[in-house]
Image (cartoon, rainbow, N blue to C red):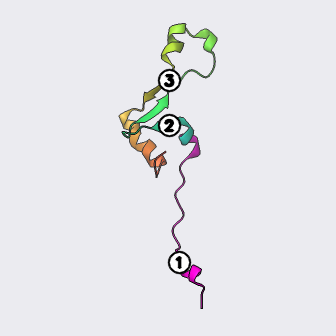
Amino acid sequence: MDSPLAEKRVRNMPKMKSMRSARRRFRITGTGKILRTVAGKGHLLTLKRRAVKLKKRGTVLVASVDREKILKIFPYGV
């Protein structure tokens, strides 16, 4: 006869994993919108105008056409 603890064990399917690289790149807001950082601020900054570098600060919303692709990467949210 099995122990009482063995009866309580339930065999569940393994959890789906989110793509770790995407977790570092995107954030989901409380209302469900997806934020990303602005591209073009990684290197060669001495060649770019000050105004361009200032515009590339912070985050922007992901385009609506890419939203569904990104949400598939996060099965349980970020």
Q: Which residue is denoted by mark 2 in the rendering? A: 26
Name the residue tied to disc 3: 58
Q: Residue at x 51, y 69 (%)?
A: 12
Which amino acid lies under the numbered mark 3 shown in the image of this protein?
Answer: Gly
Q: Residues within 10 Å of mark 1 (few under 14, many from 20)?
A: few
In the picture, measured across the screen, residue 29 lies left or right of residue 49, that is left
Q: Which mark is residue 8?
A: 1
Residue 40 sits in quarter? top right
**In front of the other: 29 or 72:** 29
- Using the rendered view, name the quadrant where residue 47 is placed: top right
- Give the residues in magenta: 1-22
Residue 66 image offset from top left, x and y in percent: 41, 37
| Residue 11 position within the rendered picture, expressed as x and y whole percent measured from the top left | 53, 73
Between discs 2 and 1, the one toward the N terminus: 1
Compared with residue 58, is residue 66 higher up or lower down, i.e. above or below?
below
Does label 3 or label 1 sit earlier along the sequence?
A: 1
